[in-house]
């Protein structure tokens, strides 16, 4: 019964994966339509460009997944701080986890992904399932490295009969510092990412300006073999530059 409940809750709280997949697919299709129109001025050109659809889809999915990861890391850090504070206040580990979840619900609502993922954990307490087992399940269901580290440290501390409050407090401090460093790095990179986005839009802005101010200026680049070849090379160079700039700004935290 507990297993079926857990699977049902986690399916409902699957961090909007289906919604994110749909959004990524629509965005990728939008890129295909835009590039087909901008580089070739032809609906038929969109057919061969659909070969790039899996590439665009993968990139968008990775982007959305990273945003989701950043959100979950932030929520996990807040939840761990709450659990640690509750333990210092004299709560048992089960009640500390319950109160931590209640604070997440108060701050972000019942639809918060971590709050929903913690629901099977609180139900597990009522079924007398060991805390370490529930936390291990939680770390498997919520794809955040910090939560996995916490559950492993908790399991070892519980097995070795150590000072649980002190160990959790120390672990939470380390995880919070790591999360803070990650936020600082992303803040520094954010300005460069904005510059990269502006630079990637500039060619289209310049071409649109010339097209409006001098109608017909680019007509000879469309609907003829040489023009198609030139625009295909331009598209390849543009996509390669996007890929390289993305790699440069991709700093693992």
Image (cartoon, helix red, strand yellow):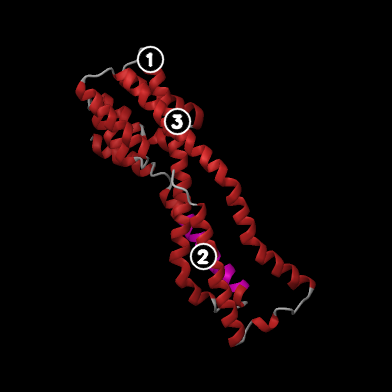
Query: Farthest bottom residue?
Result: 225
Report the side of 166 relative to 216 (left or right).
Answer: left
User: What is the C-alpha distance between the residues marked 1 and 2?
Assistant: 52 Å
Where in the figure is residue 130, as x and y percent of width and height? 22, 26
Magenta part, dominant SS: helix
Whether residue 103 is visible here, answered yes or no, is yes
Q: Quick one: SS at disc 2? A: helix
- Mark 2, residue position: 29
Question: Mark 3 or mark 1: which is in front?
Answer: 3
Q: 141 or 214: which is nearer to us?
A: 214
Query: Farthest front residue?
Result: 248
Where in the figure is residue 157, as x and y percent of width and height? 25, 24
Report the side of 212 relative to 169 (left or right).
Answer: right
Q: Which mark is residue 177?
A: 3
Q: Quick one: SS at disc 3? A: helix
Question: How busy is the neighbourhood of tag 3: few (under 14 within 10 Å), some, or many (20 plus)?
Answer: few
Question: Mark 2 or mark 3: which is in front?
Answer: 3
Which label's residue is closer to the chain start, 3 or 1?
A: 1
Magenta stretch: give its range.
22-38
Where in the figure is residue 175, as x and y percent of width and height? 40, 31
- Mark 1, residue position: 88
Query: Farthest top residue?
Result: 90
Report the side of 198 relative to 72 (left or right).
Answer: right
At horizontal 50% and vertical 76% (from top left) the residue drawn is: 47
At horizontal 37% and vertical 21% (from top left) the residue drawn is: 169
User: What is the C-alpha distance between the residues marked 3 and 1?
Assistant: 19 Å
Establish if 23 lies above or below 49. Answer: above
Question: Mark 1 or mark 2: which is in front?
Answer: 1
Quadrant of the rendered image containing residue 90: top left
Establish if 95 lies above or below 40. Answer: above
């Amino acid at each position: 019964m507990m297993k079926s409940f857990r699977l049902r809750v986690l399916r409902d709280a699957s961090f909007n994966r289906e919604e994110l997949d749909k959004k990524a697919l629509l965005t990728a299709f939008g890129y295909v339509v835009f590039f087909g129109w901008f580089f070739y001025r032809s609906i038929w050109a969109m057919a061969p460009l659909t070969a790039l659809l899996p590439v665009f889809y993968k990139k968008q999915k990775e982007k959305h997944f990273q945003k989701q990861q950043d959100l979950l890391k932030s929520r996990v850090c807040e939840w761990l701080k709450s659990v640690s504070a509750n333990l210092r206040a004299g709560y048992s580990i089960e009640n500390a986890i319950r109160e931590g979840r209640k604070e997440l619900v108060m701050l972000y609502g019942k639809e918060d992904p971590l709050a929903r993922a913690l629901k099977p954990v609180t139900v597990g307490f009522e079924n007398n399932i060991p805390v370490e087992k529930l936390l291990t399940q939680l770390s498997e269901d919520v794809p955040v490295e910090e939560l996995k580290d916490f559950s492993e440290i908790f399991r070892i501390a519980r097995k070795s009969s150590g000072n649980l409050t002190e160990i959790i407090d120390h672990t939470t401090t380390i995880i919070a510092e790591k999360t803070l460093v990650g936020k600082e790095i992303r803040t520094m990179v954010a300005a460069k990412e904005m510059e990269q986005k502006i630079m990637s839009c500039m060619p289209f802005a310049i071409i649109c300006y010339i097209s409006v101010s001098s109608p017909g200026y680019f007509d000879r680049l469309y609907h003829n073999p040489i023009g198609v070849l030139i625009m295909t090379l331009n598209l390849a160079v543009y996509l390669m530059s996007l890929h390289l700039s993305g790699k440069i700004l991709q700093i693992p935290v």
